[in-house]
Amino acid sequence: MEAANRGADDVKAKSIGLNITLPHEQRPNPYITPELCFQFRYFAIRKMHFLIRAKALVAFPGGFGTLDELFETLTLVQTGKAQSVVIVLVGRAFWERLINWQMLVEEGLIGEEELRFFHYAETAQEAWELIWRHHGVAPS
């Protein structure tokens, strides 16, 4: 999230931060527009606010929090609760090593068509173009 906030800050744009209060030190990053920094106590409420506003989820290699947000978003797309969200997984080799999508299909746990819920990108430019294309706009 910090990288996105920093990118916005670099071009003098406003950016929002949805921070979570944790038992260990967790502070908002310095690139969030101060009046757009929101603190949440519960992950579920934070995710809900994030997902009702999101047009895209771009997931980079990460841990439990990243996986939680990814699978929550996939489930909402699967159930039709988040239709406008495009999901971009950055770094195909990482994601295919971490998650055996084909095995999930072979075991009947997800449908083959559900593999279209997400896309891979290797660069920020590729991710940007996928998001624009998904929303029917030509990238600039």
Image: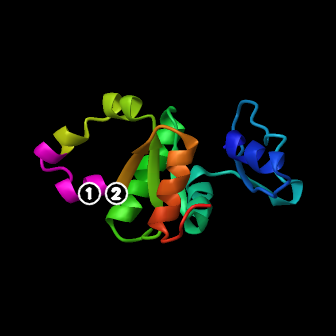
Q: How is the image coloured?
A: rainbow
Residue 3 seen = yes
Q: Quarter-wise, where is residue 111 in the image?
A: bottom left
Q: Position of residue 76 (x, y in %)?
A: 40, 63
Is residue 113 rendered to the left or right of residue 41?
left
Q: Residue 114 has which mark?
A: 1
Q: Residue 27 has which mark?
A: none
Residue 111 sits inside the magenta stretch: yes
The secondary structure that dominates the magenta segment is helix
Is residue 24 rendered to the left or right of residue 55?
right
Q: Quadrant of the N terminus?
A: top right
Q: Position of residue 130 (x, y in %)?
A: 47, 56
Residue 97 sits above or below residue 119 on the image: above
Q: Do labels 1 and 2 touch, CB within 8 Å?
A: yes
Q: Position of residue 107 (x, y in %)?
A: 12, 44
Q: Position of residue 32 (x, y in %)?
A: 81, 49
Mark 2 closeness class: few <14, some 14–19, many ≥20 residues within 10 Å = some
Mark 1 closeness class: few <14, some 14–19, many ≥20 residues within 10 Å = few
Which is more toward the observer, 61 or 52?
61
Task: State how far apart marks 1 and 2 are (Cα).
Answer: 5 Å
**The residue under label 2 is which amino acid type?**
Phe
Which is more toward the observer, 68 or 115?
115
Q: Quarter-wise, where is residue 21 in the image?
A: top right
Residue 43 sits above or below residue 101 on the image: below
Which residue is labeled 2 in the image?
117
Number of labelled discs?
Answer: 2
Which is more toward the observer, 88 or 25?
88
Is residue 25 rendered to the left or right of residue 120?
right
Please provide the residue range marked out in magenta: 105-117
Per the image, label 1 sits on a secondary structure element best described as helix
Q: Quadrant of the C terminus?
A: bottom right
Residue visible at 56% across and 68% down in the picture:
52
